[in-house]
Image (cartoon, rainbow, N blue to C red):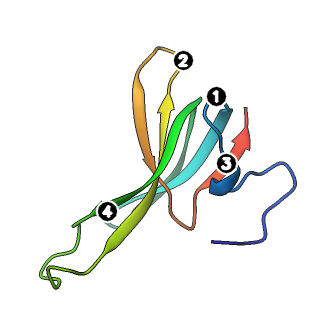
Amino acid sequence: MPSVHDVGELTFDELNPGDRIEVEHLVTVGGRQWRTRTVGTVVRTERRRHGLHFRRNFDDKVFSDVVLLELPDGELADVTVDEFTVFRPA
């Protein structure tokens, strides 16, 4: 998904295993929204097929881009990428 991004920001396609990055993403719950940051080392990136949508045709293909990060304490975290996600070198 090519887009215009600020200097210093990375795109999903530019992420490589071993890169230390900061991910800023928008969380929405009900009518509330807030931004959160996650810092870690990229383990891998993938396009994951899922079935998050109710009552869709069984062969509809729905995919999300996902970044698997290793956090500083060793924990692994999946970050699902959307149009509001921003990647920066950490």
Furthest residue in direction bottom, as rendered: 57
Is there a contact, CB below 8 Å, between mark 3 and mark 4?
A: no
| 30 or 74, nearer to the observer | 74
* Along the viewing direction, whichever of 81 and 34 lies nearer the viewer: 81
Identify the disc placed on residue 18.
1
- Front: mark 3 or 4: 4
Q: Give the Cα distance between marks 3 and 4.
A: 22 Å
Task: Check disc 4 and report the residue beneath it.
Answer: 49
Percent across and percent down for residue 57 are 16, 85
Q: 82 or 50, which lies in front?
A: 50
**Percent of width and height locating residue 4:** 78, 70
Counting residues from the N terminus, which is met first, the one under dot 2 or under dot 4?
4
Pinpoint residue 5: horizontal percent, then vertical percent: 78, 64
Numbered badge on residue 87: 3
Numbered circle sitting on residue 72: 2
| Residue 24, image x, y percentages | 60, 47
Amino acid tagged 1: Gly
Q: Residue 22, located in which quarter of the rendered image?
A: top right
